[in-house]
Every structure is written in C-alpha cells, then in structure tokens.
Image: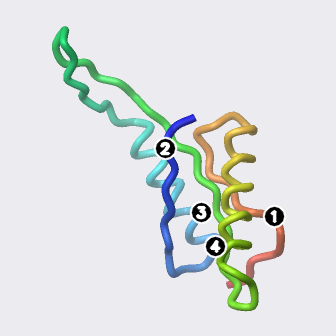
Amino acid sequence: SGESFLLNLECRALDTVDVLDRVRRAIEFNHFRIDTANGPEFIRITISCGIAAFVEAEEYEETLKAAEDALMMAKQMGRNRVHLSERRKFGR
C-alpha cells in the first residue's frame, strides 16, 4: 500500500539504481515528525522503487508497465528495495 509517483531520470539504468538506492537509504534512516492530537510523533518510513528504461521504439505505456511490474517485484521481495526491470538487458 502507499502512494506511487513517477520520476523521469536521464541516465543509465544502473546509475538510476544507485541514485534511487541512496534516496531509499536516506528516507529509511530519517525520522519524520507528525503532529497528532496527542502531540508530535516521530515515525520511520521506507520506500520501494521499480525501474525500467525507456526505449524509443516502444510506447510510453509499455515502459510504465515494466516499471510498475518492477515495483511489485520489489514489494514482493520484502519491500524497502530498488528493483530493475528484467525485461531486457540495459546497456545505456
């Protein structure tokens, strides 16, 4: 569960894995303040990321589907992960 959003990064897929893993770790090790009726509470959250490279020869929806599938795989593998789509080898 949770919210989903899309980032469009112009870099090689493996560089994207590194960038998103650093973001994931930064979020994981932060405490986030939430103001409640009983006063402030601090919580920790994690994120899961799915990555797919856009190939100009295919439709945008195909790339989005591959990223969504990679996100589902990251969650199935235990959450708090970055997963690269395995639909093709990325040399870019």
Q: Please, which residue is most extreme toward the top here?
A: 38
Mark 4 and mark 2 lie on one chain; the one further toward the N terminus is 2
Residue 6 point in image, percent of width and height:
51, 62
Instruction: Residue at 83% x, 68% y: name it.
Output: 87
Instruction: Residue at 47% x, 54% y: name it.
Output: 22
Could you tell me how far apart the alpha carbons at marks 1 and 2 are, in whole angstroms?
Answer: 23 Å
Could you tell me how far apart the alpha carbons at marks 1 and 3 are, in whole angstroms?
Answer: 13 Å
Q: Which residue is denoted by mark 3 in the rendering? A: 17
Mark 1 and mark 3 lie on one chain; the one further toward the N terminus is 3
Dividing the picture into quadrants, the one containing residue 39 is top left
User: Which three-letter amino acid code belongs to the residue tagged 3?
Assistant: Val
User: Which three-letter amino acid code belongs to the residue tagged 1?
Assistant: Glu
Are the residues tagged 4 and 2 within 8 Å (C-beta)? Answer: no
Could you tell me how far apart the alpha carbons at marks 3 and 2 are, in whole angstroms?
Answer: 20 Å
Q: In the image, which is nearer the foreground, mark 4 or mark 2?
A: 2
Q: Which residue is denoted by mark 4 in the rendering? A: 13
In this view, 64 is above or below 23: below
Residue 41, label in figure = none
Q: Secondary structure at mark 2?
A: loop
